[in-house]
Amino acid sequence: MSRQEIPYKIYLKESEMPRQWYNVRADMQNKPAPLLNPATYEPMTAEELGAVFCDELVKQELNDTDRYIDIPEEIRDFYRMYRPSPLVRAYCLEKKLDTPAHIYYKFEGNNTSGSHKLNSAIAQAYYAKEQGLKGVTTETGAGQWGTALAMACSYFELDCQVYMVKVSYEQKPFRREVMRTYGAKVTPSPSDTTQVGRRILAAYPGTGGSLGCAISEAVETASSQEGYRYVLGSVLNQVLLHQSVIGLETKAALDQYGIVPDIIIGCAGGGSNLGGLISPFMGEKLRGEKDYRFIAVEPASCPSLTRGRFAYDYCDTGMVCPLSKMYTLGSNFIPSPNHAGGLRYHGMSSTLSQLYHDGYMEAVAVEQTAVFEAAEQFARVEGILPAPESSHAIKVAIDEAMKCKETGEAKNIVFGLTGTGYFDMVAYQKFHDGQMTDYIPTDEDLQKGFDGIPSFPGNEF
Ligand SMILES: *Cc1c(COP(=O)(O)O)cnc(C)c1O
């Protein structure tokens, strides 16, 4: 197809929005390992999980067999406010790079939460409401998930309690206000409102907190209040399932123009946007129908896939959550304080971890100044100010496009542009003022994290 025939933005019609999520686990030969009870090392039962998570979400978490799961109409109604999201042909970036590659990005920043997280937040809030719960608790790091959940909870009139990593709480006061605008109660973590928070504060006075700490506090708060459950914005199978809406729309848009991607790229924190974007394509690869290159991009300062261990580990610092088999840096790993680019979780989705382990996906780690250079380059030609997280994917998409320039190949490169960066201007400021540094943890630094991975029979790594 000639250049003119592919528009800058491929919008699906509302009626073409997916009616079902796609569950990639159904097509995996090696299923992701089950969550384990940290006390017994036995797989968590639905009943045990139901004490922490909503019932319907537990079913989705444990469902390794149904390829498609219906999206309830109430959720589709909400999706209609900001979906289908555009698939953009990055003509201006291609021109600037002078590359023969064709670059496309799926833009998920077109909603007030500023990221893809709303896709799962609305689903999780819906199931909590359906179950007759009063409210939900959660953690947030950079604040996108907390914002998305606050929006979803206000829509379904649920109470929303957010533990926000203390450094972010202090650095991003406007994020906090957005959440409060939507009625959420926001507490900086670690706090003295929970036992685990008090324990962490006593052990590490003055700590700025971490996602792992905030998760422990949110889980404790959910279990200690009648009618509350805990919800999580990434990592879990159910979240990847909800985010498959990104990949399904991307595939439908590409199919309409007969475009077959060669490379699909996404940033990887806990793995939800990447998992969602690649799922339908990965399904084709797993079924032997097509072949694609998938690239996960992570920060060099928090390199769980490229330098982590594939083992059962705690999902949180307080060790109250189930154990998950994943690529991990250890639950007490905290990225260097000068890391400003997000994606700071110590572990990775068990589904993506298994796919990576089995060789279906590649991973690269990139340094943050290079990420912000790519972000700025992109912003100046494509008109969108990207989130630092998303910019990891931009960086590698540009790298791949520049390789095409050398070889003269017109590859189709698709990447996930997960969100906008308006609340990340302190990080941009550091970059502009030349105060941003790159920090790559040494093997000794990482070993401290690995030492915290539990050792029990069957968990050799
Ligand atoms: C949360 C977030 C990510 C990383 O989370 P994943 O679960 O790995 O997708 C990436 N980009 C943005 C904008 C985010 O808010």
Image: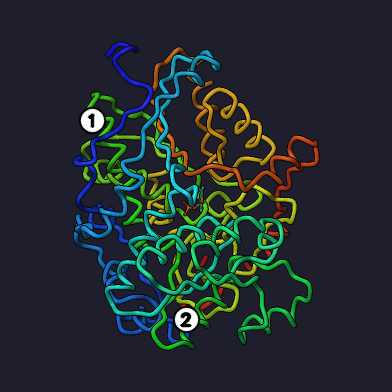
On the image, numbered disc 2 is attached to which residue? 222
Q: Position of residue 19 (x, y in %)?
A: 20, 50
In which image quadrant can residue 344 be found?
A: bottom right
Instruction: Give the residue at x 72% y 66%.
Output: 208
Question: What is the crowding at mark 1: few (fewer than 14 residues within 10 Å), some, or many (at least 20)?
Answer: few
Q: Is residue 320 left or right of residue 26?
A: right
Of the residues under marks 2 and 1, which one precedes in the sequence?
2
Quarter of the image where one finds residue 190: bottom right
Q: Amino acid at mark 1?
A: Asp
Does residue 243 appear anywhere in the picture?
Answer: yes
Check the picture and name the quadrant holding the N terminus: top left
Residue 200 figure quarter: bottom right
Q: Secondary structure at mark 1?
A: helix
- Mark drawn on residue 45: none
Q: What number is the disc on residue 255? A: 1
Of discs 2 and 1, which sits in the foreground? 2
210 lies above or below 17: below
Residue at 31% x, 66% y is: 126
Q: Is residue 158 above or below residue 353?
A: below
Residue 425 or residue 284, whichever sits in front:
425
Looking at the picture, how far across and down is residue 348, in whole percent? 48, 58
Q: Nearer the viewer, residue 449 or 244?
A: 244
Within-10-Å neighbours for mark 2: few <14, some 14–19, many 20+: many
Q: Please state which amino acid type lies under the numbered disc 2.
A: Ala
User: Which residue is rendered at x = 23% and y = 36% of the image?
Assistant: 13
- Residue labelled 2 has its Cβ within 8 Å of some atom of ligand 1: no
Across and down, in percent, residue 67 comes to 20, 55
Q: Nearer the viewer, residue 351 or 81?
A: 81
SS class of the residue under badge 2? helix
* Position of residue 367 in the picture relative to residue 60 (left or right): right
